[in-house]
Image: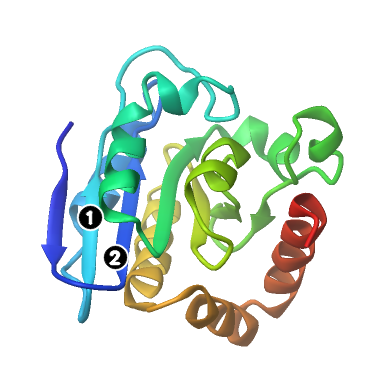
Amino acid sequence: MLLKIYGKGRPFRFFVGGLHGREWRDTSSVLMNLNMPFSGSLAVMPVVNRGKYISTLESGYYHGIGKAIVDVVEKYRPDIYVELHSYSKGNFCKLVSKDRVNKVGVPGFSSLEKGVLMGSVSPHIRREYFPVEALCLTFEIEKDNARSGEFAACILDVVKGCDSRDDFIEYMMKHYPEVAKKAIEDYKKFYGL
């Protein structure tokens, strides 16, 4: 696994892409073109797996092909963790569905702009490896949509500049208040807070 670390010290941010199947084709270049953070550290793993598609919602994902992610998380204890995934346009409605929690076991994503979706990471990694105060996000970009990748790069630059979960929430409340409120509500309901 290629792991690049930019900067040093805290906060420690960890961004990963290409977690399964061929999504690395859409996500890796976004991650590889990020610049060094102004403060703290940024670790980037642009490709986790180029092989078979296994969902991060599968209980064994982070103990199997996603073990490299867990190794970095255990070593560096990131304050901010982001997974960058991609989706086919035809799956948009399934991903943002209010009923997704009943069908798949996790809340539906929120739609930002240009086909970029935002949600939490899999509960398998969130619950087991991160404290409550850590910021753990998934961004989904639309496959074969250059504008989606460009917007994802912009939002990752915002996350890269955040020192904490609260910094990101403040940004979201200012720029995307409805999305922020839904994400916070979904998180609290799902994790029982």
- Which of disc 1 and disc 2 is earlier in sequence? 2
Q: Amino acid at mark 1?
A: Ala
Instruction: State how far apart marks 2 and 1 are (Cα).
Output: 8 Å
Residue appearing at x 21%, y 80% in the figure: 39
| Location of mark 2 (residue) | 12
Residue at 66%, 32% (x, y): give it.
Answer: 91
Query: From what the image shows, is residue 49 above or below residue 46?
Result: above
Quadrant position of the C terminus in the picture? bottom right
Query: Could you tell whether 147 is left or right of 131 in the image?
Result: left
Q: From where the camera sits, is residue 25 visible?
A: no
Q: Residues within 10 Å of mark 1 (few under 14, many from 20)?
A: many
Tell me, yes or no, if residue 171 can be seen here: yes
> What number of labels is visible?
2
Classify residue 47 by image quadrant: top left
The residue drawn where x is 34% and y is 40% is 17
Question: Which residue shows up at 36% across the image and 37% down it?
Answer: 70
Discs 2/1, front? 2
Task: Tell me the element at label 1.
Answer: strand
Find numbered disc 2 in the image and state the secondary structure of the residue it sits on.
strand
Q: Are marks 2 and 1 in contact (CB under 8 Å)?
A: yes
| Residue 34: % across, % down | 22, 61
Quadrant in which the N terminus appears: top left
- Residue 177 percent location from the top left of the image: 70, 79
